Image: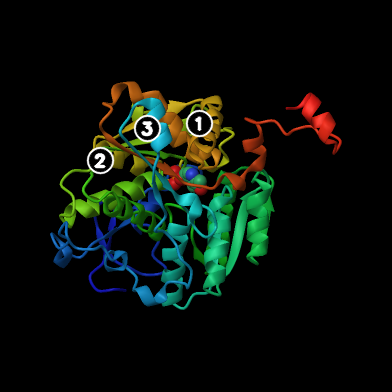
């Protein structure tokens, strides 16, 4: 691997060399029980030589801070998504600095591309060209698309409830789809068994350390794009909690590099109908029998695979969690599209819904970043719930002027 990047076990703190077949800490993984959050997740550690090496004036080259060399990444543009100043929302809410980090503009339409991009490079470097993933939809379509750009083959385990657009994406990218009767959680466990039997690289979120590491890149972009301004709050949606840990990892790295002095207040948002991490964070209660059923499919997770680490990470930086209803999510989705021209999927709109819920406790000159993780076109059925398709009329100008004008 690239010199001096290492893995550190999040449970026992043991340091390991980065290897393609090392996914969890070999000691702590023994404690894992099927259907529970993972123990022994490995986090990439920056080399000591990089400490304090990123001054405020220096332009960030993200590949300097990732464990795989640039030449192994597939020829497709991931990340560098727009940070949109939400001027209309600012005006309506009387806030001064609200920004939308719109990751729906990634090649496959979601934030997941950040992780797939690094996983694909990791596989390429190690001459592995078959990748397995379980997904609620976006991780699958993302891996399929990014891997296609790298000429790698993707095997996907999906619950039968995944939105159609995401399935179609996978098929267009030429992936092998294994749709199962049962939840995402079932698909997760099945895919682990499949990759164990075949030796293919597993990209499951949290399980593959590169998924967390790849997601940190968004924090580097936010800091660079804000320039002189500093983010005070970052709102993001939470399902398995890997985006949460990835974003925190990014800001923690930036502090280690001395690019920033303070980590923003990170607020994780969940649906009331998918609140595993919220419950654990607020009430220290891990409910392993929890059943999620939110309309926001990308954050509909029964038992969060990254549950233990996400809660620990969020506590370590004094972050917070908030719950919103599905109705609030759908209304936030429509508002973002209607007021600011940004059409994102329901899970992403949770960021905005969470902000709306907390805004009375936030002073109006603070800089707020809302992470919008996926494109609205990925789930048309959900988006349709907040709007009505029109009736069909005869093509007659007199009729239209009389009845519809
Ligand atoms: C996966 C996903 C999330 C949730 O990320 P986790 O790491 O599972 O918490 C949120 N939004 C979108 C669009 C996603 O695809």
Which is nearer the N-term, disc 3 or disc 1? Answer: 3
Position of the N terminus, as image quadrant, is: bottom left
Residue positioned most to the top:
360
Labels 3 & 1 near each other (Cβ < 8 A): no
Q: Residue at x 52, y 73 (%)?
A: 150
Name the mark on residue 264. 2
Q: Nearer the viewer, mark 3 or mark 1?
A: 3
Name the mark on residue 90. 3
Residue 64 drawn at (x, y percent): 27, 68
Dot 3 lies on which element? helix
**Left or right of 317 in this view: 334:** right
Q: Residue at x 73, y 27 (%)?
A: 405
Above or below, 140 against 67 in this view is above
Q: Nearer the viewer, residue 102 or 141?
A: 102
Mark 1 residue crowding within 10 angstroms, few (<14) / some (14–19) / many (20+): many
Residue 53 drawn at (x, y percent): 15, 63
Residue 37 drawn at (x, y percent): 43, 43
Which is nearer the N-term, disc 2 or disc 1? Answer: 2
Q: Residue at x 24, y 57 (%)?
A: 14
Distance from label 3 to label 2 (Cα)? 20 Å
Q: Residue at x 58, y 61 (%)?
A: 194
Residue 400 drawn at (x, y percent): 80, 31
Q: Nearer the viewer, mark 3 or mark 2?
A: 3
Q: Nearer the viewer, residue 90 or 137?
A: 90
Q: Nearer the viewer, mark 2 or mark 1?
A: 1
**Residue 132 visible somewhere in the drawing:** yes
**Residue 33 visible somewhere in the drawing:** no
Q: Would you name the residue on which mark 1 appears?
A: 332
């Amino acid at each position: 691997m690239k010199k001096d990047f290492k893995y550190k076990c999040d449970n026992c703190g043991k340091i390991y060399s980065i290897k393609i077949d090392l996914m969890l800490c070999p000691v702590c993984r023994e404690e894992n029980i099927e259907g529970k959050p993972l123990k022994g997740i490995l986090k990439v550690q920056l080399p000591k030589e990089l400490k304090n090496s990123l001054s405020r004036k220096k332009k960030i080259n993200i590949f300097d801070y990732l464990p795989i060399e640039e030449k192994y990444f597939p020829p497709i543009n991931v990340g560098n998504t727009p940070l949109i100043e939400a001027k209309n929302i600012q005006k309506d809410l009387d806030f001064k600095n609200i920004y939308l980090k719109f990751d729906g503009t990634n090649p496959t339409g979601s934030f997941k591309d950040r992780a797939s991009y690094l996983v694909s490079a990791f596989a390429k470097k190690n001459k592995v060209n078959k990748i397995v993933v379980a997904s609620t939809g976006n991780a699958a379509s993302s891996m399929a698309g990014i891997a296609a750009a790298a000429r790698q083959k993707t095997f996907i385990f999906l619950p039968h409830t995944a939105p159609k657009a995401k399935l179609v994406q996978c098929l267009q990218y030429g992936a092998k789809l294994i749709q199962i009767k049962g939840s995402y959680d079932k698909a997760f466990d099945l895919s682990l068994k499949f990759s164990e039997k075949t030796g293919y690289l597993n990209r499951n979120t949290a399980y593959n350390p590169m998924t967390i590491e790849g997601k940190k890149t968004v924090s580097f972009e936010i800091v660079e794009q804000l320039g002189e301004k500093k983010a005070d709050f970052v709102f993001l949606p939470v399902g398995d909690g890997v985006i949460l840990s990835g974003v925190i990892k990014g800001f923690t790295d930036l502090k280690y590099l001395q690019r920033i002095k303070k980590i923003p207040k990170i607020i994780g948002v969940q649906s009331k109908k998918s609140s595993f991490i919220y419950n654990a964070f607020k009430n220290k209660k891990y409910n392993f029998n929890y059943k999620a059923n939110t309309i926001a499919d990308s954050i509909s997770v029964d038992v969060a695979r990254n549950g233990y680490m996400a809660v620990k990470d969020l506590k370590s930086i004094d972050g917070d969690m908030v719950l919103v209803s599905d109705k609030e999510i759908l209304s936030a989705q429509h508002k973002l599209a209607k007021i600011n021209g940004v059409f994102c999927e329901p899970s992403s709109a949770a960021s905005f819904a969470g902000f709306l819920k907390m805004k009375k406790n936030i002073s109006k000159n603070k800089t707020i970043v809302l992470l919008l993780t996926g494109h609205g076109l990925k789930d048309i059925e959900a988006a349709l719930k907040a709007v009505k398709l029109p009736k069909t009329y005869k093509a007659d100008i007199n009729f239209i002027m009389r009845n519809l004008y």
